[in-house]
Amino acid sequence: MSEFDDLYQAIILDHYRRPRNRGTVPDANVRVDGKNPLCGDEVRLELRVDGDGRIVDIKSSGHGCSISQASISIMTELLKGHTFEEGRRLLESVRAMMKGGEVDEEAMGELIALRGVSKFPVRIKCAMLSWTTFELAMAEFQAGRNGAGAVVSTEDEK
């Protein structure tokens, strides 16, 4: 195992053991759920978004494997304070990374620690669960809905 593999493993374990932005957003204007029926991972994403599409607050709850929980922890850190458009670009970068594509490592931040997941197709859905849930949250908000009852499944992820 290389130095980078050790560092990436440490980042994943740190976010799994000490997840960031856990809890609820009392004044959330969008709440959505995500599920991975293959392994039982589940997440709830709650966001407070302003009129310009900027994520003022974002929190998550749920349970799952270290990959899914680290991914959502890192994602919430990266998205807080950014616009949906910036989040959409990051989502596309994560998708490209999961397909083995080249990405801007600096822009990815700690998400780069999940790059190795692309070698294990069954685990890609674990890493993507938070991102497909975020994609649903954007769609719900932009359609003028609060997401209540909206659920995305990683079975839908291509």
Image: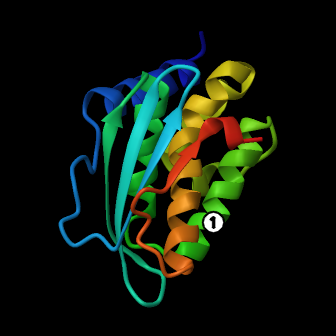
Name the residue carrying label 1: 88
Asked whether residue 105 is in view, the answer is: yes
What's the amino acid at mark 1? Arg
157 left or right, relative to 148: right
For label 1, the crowd category at 10 Å Cα-Cα, with few meaning under 14, some 14 to 19 and many 20 or more, is some
Q: Quadrant of the N terminus?
A: top right
Please provide percent x and percent y for residue 19. Answer: 29, 38
Please name whichever residue, 105 or 111, is drawn nearer the observer in this view of the structure: 111
Please provide percent x and percent y for residue 158. Answer: 77, 41
Residue extending farthest front: 149
Image height of 114 relative to 9, above or below: below
Judged from the image, the secondary structure of the residue bearing numbered disc 1 is helix
95 left or right, relative to 131: right
The residue at the point 50 percent across, 45 percent down is 130
The residue at the point 44 percent across, 65 percent down is 147
110 left or right, relative to 13: right
Residue extending farthest bottom: 51
The residue at the point 80 percent across, 35 percent down is 100
Please provide percent x and percent y for residue 70. Answer: 42, 34
Please name whichever residue, 141 or 123, is drawn nearer the observer in this view of the structure: 141
Count of residue discs: 1
Image height of 23 relative to 5, above or below: below
Please name whichever residue, 35 or 6, is drawn nearer the observer in this view of the structure: 35
Image height of 98 relative to 12, above or below: below
120 left or right, relative to 18: right
Residue extending farthest top: 1
Asked whether residue 104 is in view, the answer is: no
The residue at the point 47 percent across, 89 percent down is 52
The color scheme shown is: rainbow
